[in-house]
Amino acid sequence: MSIQTIENTNELERQIAALIVLEPRFAPVYKQVGTPNLRHNAGGFEQLMRAMVGQQLSVAAAASIWKRLVDAELITPQAIREATDDTLKKQGLSKQKTRYVRSLVDHDIDFAVLEALPNEEVITNLTAVTGIGRWTAEMYLLFSLKRADILAVDDLAIKVAAMELLGLAEPPTPKQLKDLTQHWSPYHSAASLLLWSYYGSLRDKTAVPL
């Protein structure tokens, strides 16, 4: 099975056009929010470590701790191996976050290999790490590996935006959302990006994960 990706804005716009054919209710949303930013990143160890550091923290707090880790040159597997827990604590990492980061180091993921694996296999590899759940793995698939068919059904903003889009009385459960959006495949990533932008317009805030 070939792996579908979204490499640039032109490809995203083509995918959105195809999505609208399958789900016409996206047409007014697209007209309202325009083409979303793809927000691709380089991925790898540093990207996942940064995601772990930022879990359950405000954007400002996460950015502050990450800057301290960068300044202390504590963002590589080798540096983490050589650092004591106290050293990491001094840079702002909690005991739990330290355990997560050490688990990431211990799993020694071959990030180049992930690029050729199907979505579910990538998720299986990443969620084997303590502190990485399915949502984080899906964010890696979408923003780091540029996969084209990822809908984060556990994401609160996506559930709220989907409720508005589909005319539901309340936000759907992950299973309900998965069932209701099966026909959006293989354009789930375009749908995710539009739904995040739509949520942002509904709530007048930024919803896309950083």
Image (cartoon, rainbow, N blue to C red):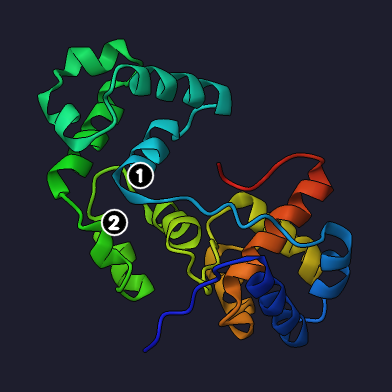
Marks 2 and 1 in Cβ contact (< 8 Å):
yes
User: Residue at horizontal 24%, vertical 44%?
Assistant: 130
Give above or below for 114 relative to 14: above
User: Residue at horizontal 25%, vertical 27%?
Assistant: 98
User: Residue at horizontal 33%, vertical 14%?
Assistant: 91
Write down the quadrant of residue 93 in the picture. Answer: top left
Q: Give the percent coordinates (x, y) of residue 61.
A: 51, 21
Q: Quadrant of the C terminus?
A: top right
> For the image shown, how many numbered marks are present on the structure?
2
Task: Tell me: 172 left or right of 67.
Answer: right
Residue at disc 2, secondary structure: helix
- Please tell me how crowded label 1 is: few (under 14), some (14-19), or many (20+) other residues with Cα within 10 Å: many
Q: Give the percent coordinates (x, y) of residue 13.
A: 72, 73
Give the numbered dot on residue 142.
none
- Please tell me how crowded label 2 is: few (under 14), some (14-19), or many (20+) other residues with Cα within 10 Å: many
Q: Which of the two residues, 175 or 134, is positioned nearer the viewer here? A: 134
- Tell which tag, 2 or 1, sits nearer the viewer: 1
Q: Can residue 171 be spotted in the picture? A: no
Give above or below for 192 relative to 96: below
Q: Which residue is mark 1?
A: 48
Task: Tell me: 35 left or right of 6.
Answer: right
Q: Earlier in the sequence, mark 2 or mark 1?
A: 1
Measure the alpha-carbon separation of dots 2 and 1: 9 Å
Give above or below for 137 relative to 6: above
User: Residue at horizontal 70%, vertical 79%?
Assistant: 14
Q: Which residue is mark 2?
A: 126
Task: Tell me: 108 left or right of 24.
Answer: left
